[in-house]
Amino acid sequence: MSNNFVVFLTADNCAHCQHTRGKGVLNDGKVLNNVEFLEKVFKYNLEIVNVHYHNMVGRRNNIKEITKFYKKDKIVFQDRYTQHDGNLRLEVLNAKTKKTVRVFNDFVGKGEKITWSKFLQERIPSKLTHYAFYFPCFLIINRKNWRESIMDEKIDLIAIPNAGITHRDKNGNVGLKKTSESINKRNTDIIKLIEEIQQGKIKMEPMEDDTVKEIKEIKEEKFALPMESFIEYQGVVVKGA
């Protein structure tokens, strides 16, 4: 399995999400759940996670459903996590040829049920909200970084979107640059993005770093003195009187 995986963010009140995802059921005729599309991603040994929100507010407590698509023994599976009465419920589907079959549908937890809030806290980084700006949004994320950012919220979540720019702001926060200019400046096909990351053409790091710019500006300001203020003497620059 690859060190990276694909995350796509969708929401109930997003018209484009409804058109491409529908109800989020495997092989239901919608593009994002279609085996044909999923196979294109699986070709690169990647899993796919769909984080689906109640509406276009990308906070962890606003998540309605989480799905994981993966391939096992040449069969495409969907693990669909939802909540019922505040508790975690799992539905497992698989696609054999063109037929989708439900193989499991029950609460999760041996003896004691697992709460939905606990599941989200343990599985979804709070900093995923830094990338929720447009929907649907495709992201490539490193597995290790995802886990570490859950365990320690001080660790930045580094994701590469298919549209827009990942940047570090002047306060050191990393996320999608949430401006229309950012989105219009860079927009690429998700399969092409996967290929470029696999080939090392795109690195898993911020594309812009405002902290570096700020340091540079401070240095330039510090030494921005007129030439008349200096006297050059035997190769040594000395400040004039």
Image (spheres, rainbow, N blue to C red):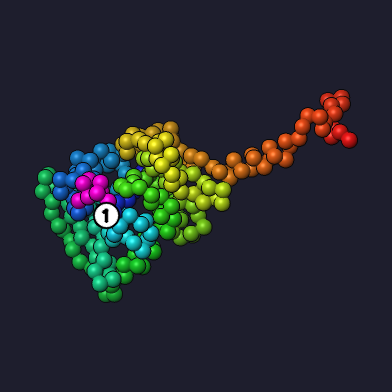
Please state the horizontal and vertical placement of residue 94, each as a whole percent of the image. Answer: 17, 52
Residue 24 relative to residue 100: left or right: right
- Give the crowd class for mark 1: few <14, some 14-19, many >=20 residues within 10 Å: few
Predominant SS of the magenta segment: helix
Where 169 sits versus 102, above or below?
above
Q: Residue 72 at what x, y percent from top left?
A: 23, 48
For this rendering, which residue is in front, 206 or 240?
240
Q: Residue furthest right?
A: 241
| Quadrant containing the N terminus in the rendered view | top left
The residue closer to the viewer here, 171 or 28, is 171
Q: Quadrant of the C terminus?
A: top right
- Taking the magenta stretch, the answer to whether it contains residue 20 is yes
Seen at 12% across and 44% down, the residue is 97
Q: Position of residue 27 (x, y in %)?
A: 16, 47
Numbered disc 1: secondary structure: loop
Is 157 on the left-hand or right-hand side of 114? right
Identify the residue at image location x=61%, y=43%. 214
Residue 77 seen anywhere in this rendered image of the structure: no
Which residue reaches farthest bottom? 111
Q: What is the magenta range?
A: 13-22
Residue 127 appearing in the image: yes
Q: Is residue 55 magenta?
A: no
Residue displayed at 24% across by 57% down: 80
Q: Position of residue 148 (x, y in %)?
A: 46, 55
Count of numbered tags: 1
Q: Amino acid at mark 1?
A: Asn
Task: Identify the image quadrant of residue 125.
Answer: bottom left
Tell me which residue sits at (29%, 59%) in the image.
54
Residue picked out by circle 1 = 13
